[in-house]
Image (cartoon, rainbow, N blue to C red):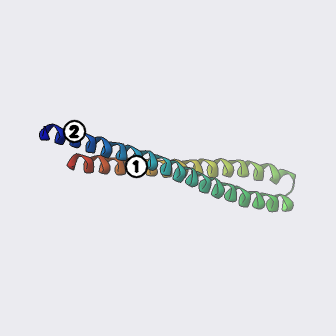
Amino acid sequence: VSTQSTGEEIKEKMACELSSLEKELQDEEKRHQLREQEVEKQHDLLARRKLMEREKELQSEMRDANAAEKDAILARYDEDVKKITTLMNSEKDKSRNKLKDQLEARRKKRKQAMMKK
């Protein structure tokens, strides 16, 4: 009878540990999502700041330009906006991928720790 109860105890302990691990993983997922949202906000703020700086430059250039120069200035401005937007999206993607890699590494570590138990 004692071996049967020990077996049951082991099963219960393993189920409890598995449940605990699943909860930890869910918590980690939530933290990851919050970090990802925060990183996106930071990148969006940076992009907005860069675009506003470029817009101020545009206004200054337009004040001092004649009609013929204004077209060229606007064309350069459009190109700069595209470059800034592309660069910021690229940086956002890099950050998102880095966070995903970190999360995956933590998952693997947890799984390895569980295998050792």
80 vs 99, left or right, is right
Residue at mark 2:
8
In three-dimensional space, the C-alpha distance between marks 2 and 1, rounded to whole angstroms, equals 24 Å
- Disc count in the image? 2
Asked whether residue 18 appears in the rendered view, the answer is yes
Q: Residue sitting at 68 percent across and 50 percent down?
A: 81
Secondary structure of the residue carrying tag 1 is: helix
Q: Which residue is mark 1?
A: 24
Quadrant into which the N terminus falls: top left
Q: Is residue 114 above or below residue 59?
A: above
Of the residues tagged 2 and 1, which is closer to the observer? 2
Q: Position of residue 58 (x, y in %)?
A: 77, 57
Residue 60 image offset from top left, x and y in percent = 81, 62
Residue type of the residue flagged with mark 1 = Glu
Q: Residue at x 44, y 51 (%)?
A: 98
Apparent side of residue 42 relative to residue 107 in the rendered image (left or right): right
Is the Cβ of the residue at disc 2 closer than 8 Å to that at disc 1?
A: no
| Residue 32 % position (x, y) | 48, 50
Q: Decide which of tag 2 and tag 1 comes sooner along the chain.
A: 2
**Residue with the most extreme front position:** 1
Q: Is residue 94 visible?
A: no
Count residues near mark 2 (Cα–Cα under 10 Å), then give few for <14, some for 14-19, many for 20+.
few
Judged left or right of residue 21, residue 39 is right
Density class for disc 1 (Cα within 10 Å; few <14, some 14-19, many ≥20) is some
Going by the numbered disc 2, the residue's amino acid type is Glu
Residue at horizontal 45 percent and vertical 49 percent from the top: 27
- The secondary element bearing badge 2 is classed as helix
Q: Nearer the viewer, residue 70 or 88?
A: 88
Residue 44 in the image, given as x and y percentages of width and height:
64, 53
